[in-house]
Image (cartoon, rainbow, N blue to C red):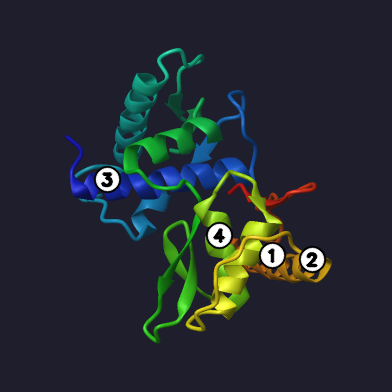
Amino acid sequence: MVTEIFSEQLKWFTRQLIEMRVHEVDGFHTSIDFDPALITNSPTDFDTARKTPQWLVIHMLTEIKGVVLKIRPETNPEPSWTLSENGHVEISGYTTELLKMYFEKTFDESSCLFGEEQNHEGSTVLTYLGLPTEISFRGNELAVFRCLKRKFGKDTSFEELYEAIRNVRDFGQGRPNQREGVTKRQITAVQSAVNEVKEKLKMATGYTEFPEIIESVRGIGYKMII
């Protein structure tokens, strides 16, 4: 039985593995070099006084593997791991696809690495890997971010994105919610807001370089993929 504490540990751990996958190299043939020391500094409650970090990592990998093989028993090769001489855990077969599938099925949440929460001043700030940043979102940026995240992994049209922006602009004015084709001016407004969101998402990762987070979908709009 997965306890609430263990569930939070699994959430944190799975997000870390997904982040490592998308930032580095995906695929079965390149292992994830995971340093168990990372869990000692995590915001999640790990009892390292009773269990070694390596044991905790392997315990979580075993749980994830068990669920993945129930969902997709034909997985080949099966996810596996080995301990290296430096104490790291070399993790193989846990691809981005399998990790996202596990996360969404287990926690009934989007596997998107980004989110939002309110800071102590009541402002909306971006979260990354479940942790709050000092990056704030408001207005068109927040509308576009929420729209892309709600349809995470799926194409989001210019019409949908502009509708999200217009709903923020017209909030409380009682204007009818009309679906219509977007003009060049409206597309420009969407593109501007998306570009601002892209830059803030990249800033939140802490990396100078990061794989594309929001893809441009030719003739349709955009898609958030990380």
Camera-nearest label, 2 or 3: 2
Whole-number angstrom distance, CA of label 1 to CA of label 2: 16 Å
What residue appears at the point 58 percent right and 56 percent down from the top-left corner? 148
Disc 1: which residue: 194
Camera-nearest label, 4 or 1: 4
What residue appears at the point 62 percent right and 34 percent down from the top-left corner? 26
First reached walking from the N terminus: tag 3 or tag 4: 3
In the rendering, at what x and y percent does residue 196 appear? Answer: 69, 70
What residue appears at the point 62 percent right and 74 percent down from the top-left corner? 140
Q: Considering the numbered disc 3 on the image, is that residue within a helix, a strand or a loop?
A: helix
In the rendering, at what x and y percent does residue 87 appear? Answer: 43, 38
In the rendering, which numbered label is found on residue 147?
4
* 53 on left or right of 203: left
Q: Quadrant of the N terminus?
A: top left
Disc 3: which residue: 7
Q: What residue type is labelled 1?
A: Val
User: How crowded is the residue under tag 3: few (<14 C-alpha within 10 Å), some, or many (20+)?
Assistant: some
In the rendering, at what x and y percent does residue 123 appear? Answer: 45, 81
For the image, the number of numbered tags is 4
The vertical placement of 88 against 70, above or below, is: below
Q: Which amino acid does label 4 sit on?
A: Cys
* 43 on left or right of 208: left
